[in-house]
Amino acid sequence: MAALASHSVQSEAKKPQRVNTPQWVSLVAGGIAGGVEAAMTYPFEYSKTRVQLLDNSAVQTSNPLRLICQVAKQEGVGALYMGCSTLIIGTTAKAAVRFVSYDTIRNSLNDEHGVLSPGRGMLAGMFAGAVESVLAVTPTERIKTALIDDAKGARQFKSSLHATKVLVQRHGITELYRGLLSTAMKQSATSAVRMGTYNILKETVKANNVKTNVFTTFGIGAVAGVVTVYATQPFDTIKTRAQGVKGVGVVEASRSVIRDYGVRGFWKGSSMRLGRLLLSGGIVFSVYEEVAAILSPKTHR
């Protein structure tokens, strides 16, 4: 009996103990990861948004790499980064908010050994997505989408700051929150799937005693990005239509997609988004884990 009791105590001792990530670490590491990811993958975001807005310009293709090449050739390389500064600022903010929100709720939902169940992982991701959509995503996405939409025609906006000033003067500060509902739906769904999938894959890797490093983290993040694209693309398409220069409601945005493309139109731009999230999933989680490990080694090693 004594031997069995001793074995039980030893088994419990071998189990990983719950260690929470400090909020300031989540905030800083998430912000850095978001900024790096946005800067490196923006051309894919540009091409995806342009296709979703029913582009009537001379550039007509649904192939992301071909569209990028054609835009660079006809409009210059700089055109591929229209609205980029806005997205970098927004992505830095939203990633910081996402990770600190996710880690905060994760810390309260995981068990005594620091393990988070798949369902709770998705719940934490959904909560983080809702928070980031209100605090960071909607205003920056509104400006970015308006800039790309405007670049197809009259070019009334000179910069991100100018676009913000014009929209606020014309319609008030609430105009920056045009598409809040569709953005919240998209961010909640995206974050739930992305963070939930990443958590499941990460726990699976740990359970199989696979040593994690920057390469395995990149791979896990990339897979999570692929799953996220096809599971949440309709939300992204509706959000983009709602945040064009004119701006429309969720219902009208949905109707316009069906009118222009049919039901398949809800997945319009998925190949462009896939290119971005395949890379961004790997980049953002890899950078986050590495920066968090530097700032707080005990919680990430």
Image (cartoon, helix red, strand yellow):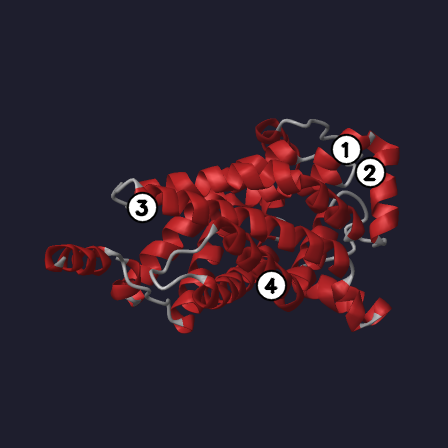
- Farthest left residue in view: 3
Q: Residues within 10 Å of mark 1 (few under 14, many from 20)?
A: many
Q: Nearer the viewer, mark 3 or mark 4?
A: 3
- Mark 4 to mark 2 CA distance (whole Å): 26 Å
- Mark 1 to mark 3 CA distance (whole Å): 39 Å
Q: Residues within 10 Å of mark 4 (few under 14, many from 20)?
A: many
Q: Residues within 10 Å of mark 2 (few under 14, many from 20)?
A: many
In the displayed structure, would residue 64 be above or below residue 186?
above
Query: In x, y percent, where is residue 34?
Result: 48, 56
State the residue at coordinates (85%, 54%). Answer: 249
Q: Nearer the viewer, mark 1 or mark 3?
A: 3
Query: Which of the 4 quarters of the picture holds residue 167?
Result: bottom right
Q: Amino acid at mark 2?
A: Val
* One can see residue 88 in this view: no
Query: Which of the 4 quarters of the picture holds residue 200?
Result: top left
- Farthest front residue in view: 1
Q: Which mark is residue 265?
A: 1
- Mark 2 to mark 1 CA distance (whole Å): 6 Å
Q: Amino acid at mark 1?
A: Gly
State the residue at coordinates (59%, 56%). Answer: 87
Quickly name the residue at label 4.
Answer: 132
Query: In x, y percent, where is residue 160?
Result: 66, 61
- Mark 1 to mark 4 CA distance (whole Å): 26 Å
Q: Is residue 36 left or right of residue 42?
A: left
Quickly name the residue at label 2.
Answer: 257
Query: In x, y percent, where is residue 121?
Result: 50, 54
Secondary element type, mark 2: helix
Quickly name the residue at label 3.
Answer: 206
